Image: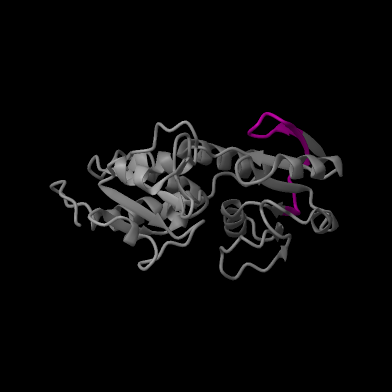
Amino acid sequence: MSEILADDLGTAVELPHPPRRVVSLVPSLTEALAVTVPDRLVGATDWCTHPADLDVVRVRGTKNPDRATIEALRPDLVVANQEENRKLDVERLRAAGVPVWVTVTESVEQALSSMRRLFGEVLGVGTPEWLATATTEWTRGPELPDTRVAVPVWRDPWMVVGARTFTGDVLARLGLVNVFGSAADRYPRVELDELRGAGPELVLLPDEPYVFTAEDGPDAFPGTATVLVSGRQLTWYGPSLATARADLTAALGRAVRPDGQRHG
C-alpha cells in the first residue's frame, strides 16, 4: 500500500506506508533516523558522523552522492535537504524511480516542523522524545545579553553566516545579534577588514565546515573575544537540538559576563 504526500517543497512523493528502507543524504537527518528508527536506515553519506558507531552502506558525499549505490540499496525513501543537496541529484534519483523527500530547514521552527512531519506523517512513528525535548527547549526566551556576534564558516576566503539561515535563527533565539544578519546572501563572502569592521563583540568559531582551532582562527581577531564552538550545536538539527541550547549558553556564558561585559 502506498500514499502520496507533499514534501517541504510541495513536491508530491509517492511512498510505501511506512517506508522501511531509508537512505539519508543529510548528516543531521542521518543521526535523527539512526536514533529513532535504526532498523530502517540502510545508507548514508561519508559525512554522516553521528552516531559514532553508525554501520550502514556509505553513498559518498552530500554534493556528489553515488546514485548507482543508492539505487542498488533499493530504498523506498531517500531523505535530502534543499540546502545541503543538489537539485540535479534529486531529479536524477526520482527519474530512476527512487522516492526522494526534500526537507527545508532555514530556521529552528522549520527544522522542528519538518522533522515532526518526517517522523509522524512519513515514517509513522509519532514525535520522538528528543524532538519533543528540543521543541520545549527552543520555545524558551533568550538567555544571553544582546551581544553583537559574527560567525565565520570558512577562511581564505572568509565566509560568514548571513541572513535566512538555521544558524542565524539559533543565534537570535539565544539573544545574540548577528552583525551580518541583514546581508543579501545567506553565507556572504567578506574581506577580513570588513568582518572586523562590522564591529562584532564576540566571534564564534565553529569546527565545521572549516575546522577552526585555538591556533587557527582567534589570531585573525586581535582585541576581540573569540569562542571555539561545536559546529554540530550551531548547524545540526537532529537529536543534538535537545541539548544544543544549554551547551551553547554555557559555552558563550563564559565569554559574556552577566553584567554584559565581554572577556577579551
The total number of labels drawn is 0
From the viewer's perspective, is 84 left or right of 226? right
Q: For the point 44% across and 47% down, which residue is it?
A: 134
Residue 213 appears in the rendering: yes
Q: Residue furthest bottom?
A: 53
Q: Does 150 lie within the magenta span?
A: no
Quarter of the image where the C terminus is located = bottom left
User: Does residue 95 appear left or right of residue 56 in this picture?
Assistant: right
Q: Nearer the viewer, residue 187 or 229?
A: 187
Q: Position of residue 178 (x, y in %)?
A: 35, 39
x and y percent of residue 17 in the render?
76, 42
Residue 197: x and y in percent read 30, 42
21 falls in the magenta region: yes
- Nearer-the-camera pick, 218 or 43: 218
Judged left or right of residue 49, residue 150 is: left
The one nearer the camera, 36 or 103, is 103
Instruction: Classify residue 114 by image quadrant.
Output: top right
Q: Write the start and end of the magenta stretch as one range.
A: 4-22
The residue at the point 65 percent across, 60 percent down is 38
Q: How is the image coloured?
A: one colour
Q: Who's the residue at 13% across and 47% down the image?
A: 259
